[in-house]
Image: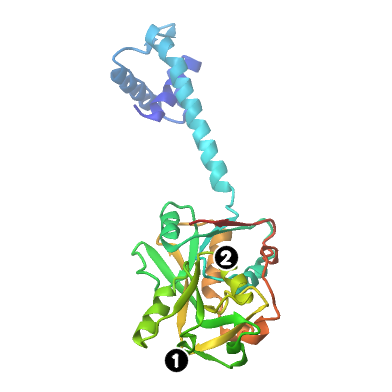
Amino acid sequence: MELYQVRYFLALCETLNFARAAERCHVSQPSLTRAVQKLEGELGGLLIRRERRRTHLTELGELTRPMFQEIQAQTERIKASAKLHLNQEKKTLRLGVLPSIGPLRFARFFAQFSDDAGIELQLDEAPLPALWDMMFRDKLDAAVVVAHAERIDDRLRCHPLYKERLLCAMSRDHPLARRDNVRLRDLEGQNFLMRSNCESKDLILENCRQQGLKLHIAHRSAREDWVQVMVAAGCGVTIMPEFCRSLPEIATRPLIDPELVREIALVTVVGRPHGQLIERVLRALRAHHWHYDDAPDVEERIEIGPVRASSAKLGTTVRFAHRV
C-alpha cells in the first residue's frame, strides 16, 4: 500500500468522479483508476462501485475511508513537524571538555562570538570514556581533549588546536616559588597533590620512573578546585597544565628536566552534519591561531584571577555540567 494510492482514493471519495479526482491529484484518469484498483486488490474487495449514472462507495469503502483519512492526516503532521524542525536553526553548541582543560583560552575565544545573539554554549565536563560515549550518542557536537590521551577512534576526526606546557604549582610562600623554574627531581620529598582526573598523570609518573624518582603523594582528588585550593593553602605542590590555573594565590613555575608538553585538540564525529551557526563556530575553533603570544605568560596570569562562566558572551546562556 502506497501513500499516493490513499491520496487518490480519498480524492475519489470527495468527488465521486474519476475525471475530477484525477484532475485534483494532477494525474491522468487511467493512472488514478489503476492506483485505486491496485489498492482494492491489496484489500481484497471493491472500494468504489462505478455505475453509469451513480458512483458510490461500497461498504468496504465506507469502512476504510476514515482510516485512510487518519493516515493522510498523520502523514501531513509528520511532514509539518519535519519542516519545522529543519527550519529551526540549532543554536546550542554542546561542547564536551576534559576536567583538566582550563577555561582561560576558550573563554576569550567564545567572547568573540558575542554578536551571535541566541547561541547557547553548553559545556559538559567528563572523563574521556564518558565524552566518547556522549559523542557517539549525539549528545555532544564536539569535545576538547588531549590529543594523545588515548588512541582516537576511527569514527572521530581530530583537529589539533594548541600545545600546553605542564607547570609546577605551589603556594606563594613555598620555597620553590622563589625559583625561576622547577626540575622534576626537585619534587622528590615534597607533599604532592595528585590530580586524579588529569590525563597527564601517566605521563608524569612515567617520567618519574625513568628518573628513578618516587613522588610522595599526600592527597588525591578528582576535583580541580579542591586541588588548587589545597595547593594555595600550603598542603603541597602539584603539576598542572598552564591554562588550568584559576586561583591568583597559586604560584606556577615552568617544569624542566624534562619539559612536559601536551597537545589539545577538538574532536568531532566523522560525517555528522551541524546547523550553519554551530558549524561556523566549529570552523572558527579549528581555524583559530592558538599561539602562546596571544596568552599572558606565567607570572602575568597570576593577576588575572578566576575566569567565570559569565565571561563567555554568547548571547543567552552558558550552561555547565559535570559528569563522572
For the N terminus, the image quarter is top left
Crowdedness near tag 2: few (<14), some (14–19) or many (≥20) residues, C-alpha within 10 Å: some
| Side of 38 relative to 259 (left or right) | left
The residue that disc 2 covers is 281
Q: Work out whether 132 lies above or below 263.
A: above
Q: Is residue 17 visible?
A: no
Circle 1 SS class: loop
The residue at the point 65 percent across, 73 percent down is: 108
Circle 2 SS class: helix
The residue at the point 69 percent across, 67 percent down is: 311
Nearer to the camera, 188 or 51: 188
Nearer to the camera, 312 or 278: 312
Nearer to the camera, 232 or 113: 232
Q: Work out whether 185 lies above or below 140.
A: below
- The percent position of residue 266, horizontal first and vertical second, equals 48, 69
- The percent position of residue 16, horizontal first and vertical second, equals 46, 14
Quote the CA–CA distance across marks 1 and 2.
38 Å
The residue at the point 49 percent across, 64 percent down is: 143
